[in-house]
Amino acid sequence: MKALVTGGAGFIGSHLVEELVRLGHEVVVIDNLSSGRIENLSTVSSRIEIVEADLSKNLDWERYFGGIDWVFHLAALADIVPSIQDPDSYFASNVNGTYNLVRASQKAGVKRLIYVASSSCYGIPEQIPTPETEPLKPQYPYALTKNIGEQIVMHWGCVYKINVISLRLFNVYGPRSRTSGTYGAVFGVFLAQK
């Protein structure tokens, strides 16, 4: 299989890329390196193609979709507080970038598109553990833009018959998760302290 991973130099994306390579798949990574780091791919960098590009901007990156079987879309701006301070950037990245990605996937005839959504779409849920049927209440621009991205992906799946899956992740943590910065993930900070 030939896979394309957006945000593949990030915390979650880099682990996914390593696993795809371990399983023997051909991998292309597209990342603008705004939060991802090339060092996260050091164990597989000689066996993958890395493209530095921003999905929300010019579409020069579309050519890398040729022959792709599966697309894993993890690229996004994350964090709540910065999304309140700069909603324009979040809409550009998480909405426009996702729209551009589904259009490129459709044109290239990819077999499957996996979108990494966010549990933030539930706001503060009434039920914990939170089922998928919990009402959506995005409270911040980050949550709203990730939810709009999910709707775009699911809509394209229905209208254009693309095989799509959306995963709403909750508080992912582990090796290579952020442990510093003003908005570092709390689990990453706990791991660093450990």
Image: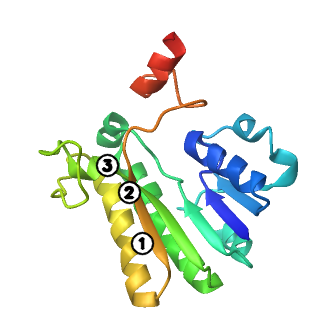
Mark earlier in primary sequence (2, 3): 2
Question: Is 94 drawn above or below residue 108 in the view shown?
Answer: above
Q: CA distance from mark 3 to mark 1?
A: 16 Å
What residue occupies the far right of the structure in this picture?
A: 46
- The residue at 48%/33% (across/down) is 173
Q: Relative to the observer, which residue lies in front, 137 or 88?
A: 137
Looking at the rendered structure, which numbered label has been put on residue 65?
none
Q: CA distance from mark 2 to mark 3?
A: 18 Å
- Report the side of 177 relative to 131 (left or right): right
Residue contact between numbered discs 2 and 1, judged by CB atoms under 8 Å? no
Residue type at numbered disc 3: Ser
Q: Relative to the observer, which residue lies in front, 13 or 94?
A: 13
Label 3: state its secondary structure: helix
- The residue at 64%/59% (across/down) is 5
Q: Position of residue 30 (x, y in %)?
A: 67, 57
- The residue at 64%/44% (across/down) is 15
Q: Residues within 10 Å of mark 1 (few under 14, many from 20)?
A: many
Looking at the rendered structure, which numbered label has been put on residue 153?
1
Q: Point out the frontmost of discs 2 and 1.
A: 1
What residue occupies the far left of the structure in this picture?
A: 126
- Report the side of 118 relative to 172 (left or right): left
Badge 2 is on which residue? 91
- Report the side of 180 relative to 51 (left or right): left
What residue occupies the far bottom of the structure in this picture?
A: 160
Displayed quadrant of residue 60: bottom right
